[in-house]
Structures are given as C-alpha cells and as structure tokens.
Image (cartoon, rainbow, N blue to C red):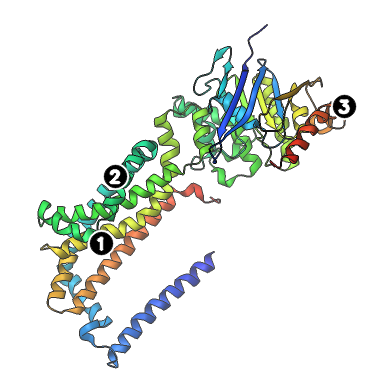
Amino acid sequence: MRRDRGIVFAWQLAIGIGAVASWQWLVGVKLLDPFFVSRPSDIAIRIATWVTSGVIWGHLLITLEEAFLGLVAGAVLGITLGFVLARSPLVARICDPYITMLNGVPRVVLAPIFLLWFGLGIWSKVALAVTLVFFVMFFNTFQGVRDADRVLVDNARMLGASERQLVRHVLIPSALTWIFSSLHTSLGFAMVGAVVGEYLGSSRGLGYMISQAEGTFDTTGVFAGMVVLASVVVAAGMGVTRLEKWLLRWKRSEA
Amino acid sequence: MPIPALEFVHVSRSFATPAGRDYRALDDICLAVPAGAFLAIVGPSGCGKSTLLNMAAGLLAPTSGTVRVGGAELAGLNRHATYMFQQDALLPWKDVRENVGLGLTLAGVGRADAQARADAWLARVGLAAFARHFPAQLSGGMRKRVAMAQNWIIDRDVLLMDEPFSALDIHTRQRMEGELLALWGESRRTIVFVTHDLEEAIALADEVVVLSAGPASHVVSRHAVTLDRPRDLLDLRTEPAFVDLYRSIWADLRQEVIKSHASGRV
C-alpha cells in the first residue's frame, strides 16, 4: 500500500513534467506556434507576476466566494429535497418529469437570464453554480437514502427508532457515502458555474480575467487563468478527501 | 390458562408475484408461544419462516388472521419484541459501544447512562476491550455478540431470532448458542428462534415446531423437547434422548424437505 502510493505519485509527477516539458520543447523548436498555445515558461512567469503584484487575489477571492456560496446553497437544497423525495415515493413520482426536464436545460442558456434577474454582481454567478450543484447533490442523496440497507432500517425501528431518529441515525449516515462521492463532482461544478457566469458578464473574478485575456488574443493569460483555476480545484478536492476520510472512518477495517 | 406472550391466530400471508399472481406463503397458522418459553421453528428453505417472524415483529401485516402480543391484537410494530436478524444489522458508522446502547439512546436515555450500561453488557459478552471498535473491525462471531447485547440491553418480553448464527463456523456457533441459553436462563424472556438446522433447534428449545414446504406453509407438527436444563451443548448431541427426539422430528421434517426439493423451490 505504502509502496504503491510512492509509485503512483512518481508516475503522476513524471506524466505532468513530461507533458509540460514536451509542450515547452515543441514551442521551442517552432513545431507549435506560441500565439495559439503560449508556452509553459511564459505561463509560469505570468502567474508569478499576478501573484507578486497581488492582482490575482481579488479576482480569485471573488470566484471562490461565488463557488462556495453556490456549493453550500446547492448542497443544502439538493440534500434536503433528495431526502424529502426519497422518503415520499408518491411525491417523487409526481416530480420526476419536472426534475428531468429542469436538469436537461443547458446552464449556459440560463446564464444571460440570471444576469438579467440577479445583476452583474456575484449573485448571478452563485445562482448558476447552484443550478449545477443542486442536481448532482439531489440525485446522489435520493439514491443514497433509497439504497439504505433494509435490515439496518428494520433493526433500528425494532429497537425503537422514530421516523426522525431513523433519519438521523441510519439514513443520513447511509447517504453520506453517496453525498461525499458527489461532493468532489459538485466542487468542480461550483467553480464552473462561477467562472462561466463571470465569463459571460462581470467585472471581477477569474472568469473575467480569462475573458479579458481572450479579448486581446492573450493566450498566455487564458492558460494562466486555467492553471490557477485547476490548482484551486485540486487543492479544494484534497480538503474534501481529508474530511471524507475522517467522517467515513468507520469504513476502514483497521483503526 | 395464562395469556401467551405471542400468538398467531389463523394467520395467512400472500405476496404478489412479479407476474401479478397471488403467492400464498403461509396458510392458516395457529400457534401460541407461552411466556418465558424458547420456541424453535424449523422448516425447509423458502417455507416462510422469516415471513412468520416479520409478522410477529409487526414489520409485515398478515393478509388474514391476527397476531396477538400478550393477548392484545398487534397493529404496527411490536413494541414488546426485539429482532435479531440473520444478516448483520449493526450500524457500521457507530462504534461497538454506541451500537450496543442504541436502543437506550433511541429511548432517550442519557449519554453517560447509556454508555455505562452498554459497557456492562460488553463485559458480559466478553467484548469490553472492543468498545471503541467499529463493526467492520470485528470477526463474525464478535459482531453477533454485539448484536446479542444490543437486543438484550433493552428490556422487552419477546426476542425474535431469524437464523442468527447460520453464517458462523460450527465452533463459534456452539459457543454463541451456549451464551444465548445462559442469557435466556437468567432473564426468562420468550424466544422465537427460526432455523433450518434441526440439531440447533432441539439443543436450544423447549418446543420445536415443524413448518411444511411452501407454498401455503402450515404447521405440520409440534414436539416438546424434554431434555433437562441447563444443557451441556458440547455433549448433548450424542445423548440417547437427543438422538431419539432428532429421529422422530426428522421423520416429519424429512417429508417437507423432500417436497421442497421436488417442487424445485430451493
């Protein structure tokens, strides 16, 4: 297990370095045009400039704020509705076509409408993130509650659990596995929602930076923005994994 | 005549098959379990033994007939019984102590009190050192012990058991049977114990009920087990009285097992 981890990390590092090095090299020998693909060293310098001049922090903070609010609101709504519908099959059947329909709406189409409704500030971006996060959370919670082990439920009921105690002691922990596996996806979606919203209309945030760079054919700026975005998602994902490990510690067979 | 702890009065139960037809699992079961008795129910696979227990637990309603608990007709869950399932029913996300004390917690007993009482029960089943372990970290036999403690810690008149030890190896199983008899001897609870293993049924019970092969299972015969208590489970099975009983009950059960094989329902 420990050795595996070393091997995995070594390979991950090697692939990353290999990809970046060949990119740099291909541009260096003029096989690729830096106008279209920029080059890693330029991107690194750009990011360093952003960081040292401090210009990146304000934008990053705005994007993170939007993504965070979208994630929390989407999760609360999705988990709540997932629970309610999983516990009342009749309501679930009534709502089913509408949920499928709403989930089928492409979010990019919604962005301009949200801009109209909620303005150019952060709330239109939060709303967009919510529409993405909500459905992932909803479907996973619904499934998780529905899939709760019948015997565990019966046993708890025989031991005297009321409906509320059943939710608290059996159904929520049981759904937690599903909810957490979807949290990773949701995290990415929340960032996508925020950035796409900014991209389509805003004056601040990473999406705004990227769209500004695109407007002036500044490919280095676009790539630098993407790298920052990706790093933030990876870092946040690692945080979620640690939280998950702690909350789901009962799953490991050795303490 | 004293009121039975549990009574089935002309109980039948049908299920809808996937094809939309009616499948009658149990047909006109009449059975009374005296308070404090240890009743074993045996029968071939698929004869509806678990269905019968589920109805005693109130998890399932009879299609016709009534289940009586302490003389009163059962509606909804049976609040006078606990149920030990064949499968693992411990909550995997709670540690052993929390699992044992679960029934107390659900009844609103305070945290410290529930813990203390759970610890006392853990000591009783020999798992004091494992209070903070999670079920996934225990062996199958240890998990059954935790389940036993979980079922015994709350004071209910009836304990329903659905092949609780069938997944264990034979030696662990005999140990668990011994511990069960010891607990029962101290408490004089009423136990309804479902098993497909006739030896286990005779070794534990006061009375063995034979159910017929399905569909429409009914009570074939009832046999009083007159072996002395306390019983020494290690040597019991070779005693002449045990062997005689086994032979006479097996004569009934054998017919049903053959029928269930013939109908290809195994």
Q: Report how far apart the C-alphas of labels 3 and 2 lie in the structure.
A: 65 Å
Q: Is residue A85 visible in this depiction of the protein?
A: yes
| Quadrant the N terminus of chain A occupies | bottom right
Comparing B186 with A145, the one in front is A145
* Circle 2 crowding by C-alpha within 10 Å: few under 14, some 14–19, many from 20: some
Query: Left or right of A143: which side holds B158?
Result: right
- For disc 2, the marked residue is A76
On residue A192, which mark appears? 1
Labelled disc at residue B244? 3
Separation of residues labelled 1 and 3 (CA atoms): 76 Å
Residue shown at 54%/30% (left/top)?
B118
Measured from the top left, where is residue A25 in percent x and y?
32, 88
Mark 1 or mark 3, whichever is nearer to me: 3
For the residue labelled by badge 2, is the local secondary structure a helix, a strand or a loop?
Answer: helix
Q: Where's residue B73, x and y in %?
A: 54, 15
Q: Amino acid at mark 1?
A: Val
Of the two numbered discs 2 and 1 on the same chain, state the one appearing first in sequence.
2
